[in-house]
Image (spheres, grey):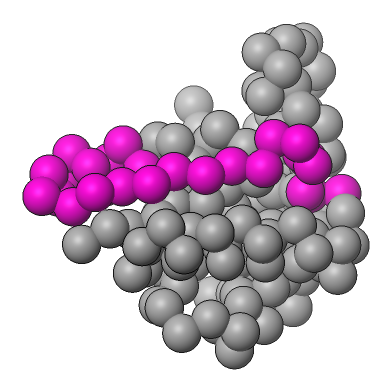
């Protein structure tokens, strides 16, 4: 069996590596779209135009399942993509539920792209799991590019995280991990 893993950038490589480690008999095909990065500030229709040909190539190359390791794609386009492709698409999304379950202060932080934060799916997750919880959404619009270019500005990130901490957030909700903030 061959499993495809897609992310707009290199972040999904950790997902591909985890699958390969957990399922060594599975062939894993990782693809990114570094050419059009970042997705997180683009409109879903534009992103769809980038993703469809990549998924078509992955399927043509024998991928029987595609893991969408990109929150922006998962939260804005997964239904459209599932209607276009016959292979199963597994989507990652912000881990709002676990973060809501972990908080002791009643305040969580969601570090995500503007497009993810504006998505219908993210709104659904908040409606389902954070009724009595404050959600802080710091500006992370430039984080993807910093990471991809290996030019992380720790002062900017620290400033934004400190703003979150000042609001008493005790859990950071990311796409694959819910990590306590200390």
Residue 140 horizontal side relative to residue 74, left or right: right
Find residue 41 and report its horizontal and vertical position in percent. 87, 49
Residue 108 colored in magenta in the image: no
> Height in image: 180 above or below 117?
above
Residue 163 horizontal side relative to residue 4, left or right: right
Q: Specify the segment rendered in magenta.
A: 16-41
Q: Nearer the viewer, residue 53 or 155?
A: 53
Find residue 22 and report its horizontal and vertical position in percent. 15, 46
Single out the residue that lies furthest toward the front. 60
Number of on-image labels: 0
Name which quarter of the figure residue 157 lies in. top right
Find residue 58 and report its horizontal and vertical position in percent. 48, 59
Single out the residue that lies furthest toward the bottom. 83
Name which quarter of the figure residue 72 lies in. bottom right
Find residue 59 and report its horizontal and vertical position in percent. 46, 66
Residue occupying the point 80% across, 18% down: 156
Q: Nearer the viewer, residue 78 or 34?
A: 34
Residue 21 colored in magenta in the image: yes
Image quadrant holding the N terminus, namely bottom left
* Residue 46 appears in the figure: yes
Residue occupying the point 88% across, 54% down: 42
Residue occupying the point 40% across, 77% down: 88
Residue occupying the point 31% across, 47% down: 28
Name which quarter of the figure residue 37 lies in. top right
Residue 114 horizontal side relative to residue 5, left or right: right
* Residue 166 appears in the figure: no
> Height in image: 79 above or below 144?
below
Single out the residue that lies furthest toward the left. 25
Q: Nearer the viewer, residue 122 or 161?
A: 122
């Amino acid at each position: 069996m061959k499993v495809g893993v897609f992310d707009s950038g290199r972040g999904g490589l950790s997902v591909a590596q985890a699958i390969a480690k957990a399922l060594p008999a599975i062939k894993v095909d990782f693809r990114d779209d570094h050419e059009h990065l970042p997705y997180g500030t683009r409109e879903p229709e534009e992103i769809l135009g980038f993703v469809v040909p990549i998924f078509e190539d992955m399927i043509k190359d024998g991928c029987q399942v595609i893991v969408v390791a990109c929150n922006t794609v998962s939260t804005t386009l997964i239904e459209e993509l599932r209607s276009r492709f016959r292979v199963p698409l597994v989507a990652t999304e912000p881990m709002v539920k676990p973060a809501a379950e972990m908080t002791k202060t009643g305040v969580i932080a969601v570090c995500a792209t503007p497009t993810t934060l504006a998505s219908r799916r993210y709104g659904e997750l908040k409606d389902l799991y954070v009724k009595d919880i404050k959600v802080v959404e710091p500006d992370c619009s430039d984080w993807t590019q910093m990471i991809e270019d290996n030019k992380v500005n720790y002062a900017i990130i620290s400033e934004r995280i400190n703003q979150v901490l000042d609001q008493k957030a005790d859990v950071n909700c990311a796409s694959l991990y819910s990590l306590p903030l200390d």
